[in-house]
Amino acid sequence: MELTLNSYKIFELGNHISTFLHDCGITKGGVLNIKVNKEELRKIDEDLYYRQNPKGEDFIPSDNEIQISFPNVSIIIQCAVKPTSL
């Protein structure tokens, strides 16, 4: 399955949620956590990076979390850690 959560979809989602929260009277502190696997996180991170750095500078991956802030909500995309077996 191809990953379709790209920078455009993230910004569309963030703007929609931010506006929705504002319309509901929530104007600060909203947080949306999205957990993805490590490969998906890298793809999203790289897409966001090159959208902001179109000159092709070297991509430096984030550790295990990406945060994108909007006026009324922050979207935090994290690497879902699989529990270890005992």
Image (cartoon, helix red, strand yellow):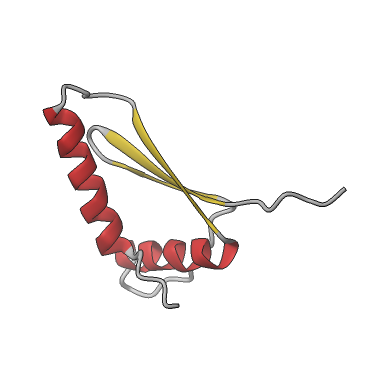
Residue in the picture at 43% in, 63% down: 44
Q: Is residue 37 above or below residue 2?
A: above
Instruction: Give left or right: position of 37 versus 5.
Output: right
Residue 22 falls left or right of residue 43: left
Q: Residue at x 37, y 34 (%)?
A: 31
Q: Position of residue 86 (x, y in %)?
A: 88, 48
Q: Where does residue 20 sit, x and y in percent of width and height?
A: 17, 36
The image quarter containing residue 49 is: bottom left
In the picture, the quarter occupied by the N terminus is: bottom left
Q: Residue at x 18, y 46 (%)?
A: 16
Query: Who is closer to the viewer here, 54 or 39?
Result: 39
Q: Residue at x 38, y 68 (%)?
A: 47
Q: Examine the rendered structure and indicate whether residue 82 appears above or below residue 44.
A: above
Residue 59, horizontal then vertical, whole percent: 48, 68
**Residue 10 position within the rendered picture, expressed as x and y whole percent measured from the top left:** 30, 56
Residue situated furthest left in the rendering: 23
